Image: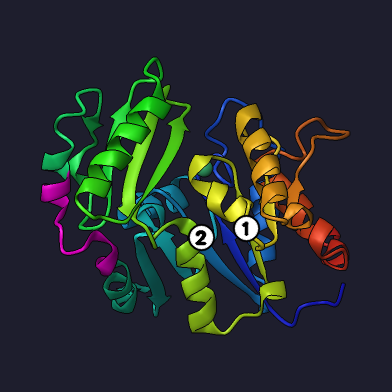
Amino acid sequence: MKRPARLLLCTDMDRTIIPNGSQPELLSVRKQFAKFCSLSQLCLVYVTGRHLRLMEEAIEEYNLPEPDYAITDVGTKIYHRHECKWQENLAWQTMIAGAWKGKSHGQLQEALNCVTELILQEPDRQNDFKLSYYLPLAVDEKRILHGVQQRLKELNVQASLIWSIDEAKNMGLLDILPGNATKLHGIEFLQQQLGYQPDEIIFAGDSGNDIPVLTSSIRSILVANARQEIQAQAIEGARKNGNAASLYLAVNTESGVDGNYAAGVLQGIIHFFPEMNEKLEKM
Ligand SMILES: [Mg+2]
């Protein structure tokens, strides 16, 4: 595989580079990750369910490198960091607005009032194009998601329903987004705007809202601490889409934790770009 002149590293945050899951993290791996991200050929993008302020809090709390770009709110917002300030990409907002066919966040929320199992998330987890609910894990989520999809279809709204599990809260999360505004769509938009070739992009993730990217043709890493069912879903989805070779499953080997979180991300980068190993060993 030829060495890319530059690399667009897109990574999820929680339980991918932030070790806030139940599994242990390899000692000082985040320092090594930050050093790697400081390479001049590397452009770092955080792709997260968090909103901008929560993302910044995590960067500080966990000593993470500052990214060049941020795709936040599960893909519904894109920001560029310029001279230490965040600038929102308004072209992205315009692009995703069409899928909701002029319906507002409030109108969609009202239409879903009849689905009584849904619990609205806090106001700071909502935006014009992100309607987010909690759903207790004891509920049959497939039935609820089907019902939600039906209601939205009646309104002629094109939506992506993203289901994930918040391990810490032991709670299901349902994000209703414009049909063209998942993490995958956000990455593809940024790739096009910045002019990166497909072989110059890599993604890492761990959970349900990462599945659209993990099963796409983008070279992707699933960290070893991901839940079993996510692993199965990613393998099956990538195979169905003809993208099995683009998915790398990080594994825990000798130390037992070198596939978890940021260590898994670095392991995957070496898998796709073996020549990076030498650089990483020196860090
Ligand atoms: Mg995550």
Task: Verify whether residue 100 appears in magenta.
Answer: yes
Q: Which residue is mark 2?
A: 184
Disc ID at residue 93:
none
Give the amino acid at mark 1. Ser
- The secondary structure making up most of the magenta span is helix
Task: Look at the numbered discs 1 and 2 and tell me whether their residues touch, using CB distance below 8 Å.
Answer: yes
Q: Residue furthest top?
A: 138
Q: Position of residue 277 (x, y in %)?
A: 86, 61
Side (left or right) of 73 relative to 241: left
Give the amino acid at mark 2. Leu
The residue depicted at 17 percent of the width and 47 percent of the height is 108
Q: Which residue is mark 1?
A: 216
Is residue 125 visible in the rendered structure shown here? no
CA–CA distance in space, label 1 to label 2:
8 Å
Q: Nearer the viewer, residue 69 or 196?
A: 196
Q: Position of residue 190 (x, y in %)?
A: 48, 74
Q: Which residues are magenta?
A: 97-108
Q: Position of residue 210 (x, y in %)?
A: 53, 48
Q: Position of residue 136 (x, y in %)?
A: 34, 21
Q: Is residue 234 above or below residue 45?
A: above
Task: Identify the secondary structure beneath mark 1.
Answer: loop
Q: Quadrant of the N terminus?
A: bottom right
Task: Identify the secondary structure beneath mark 2.
Answer: helix
Q: Is residue 163 above or below residue 274?
A: above
Q: Is residue 161 above or below residue 22?
A: below
Q: Is mark 2 within 8 Å of ligand 1?
A: no
The crowding category of the residue bearing disc 2, from other C-alpha atoms within 10 Å (few below 14, some 14 to 19, many at least 20), is many
Instruction: First in sequence, mark 1 or 2: give its number.
Output: 2
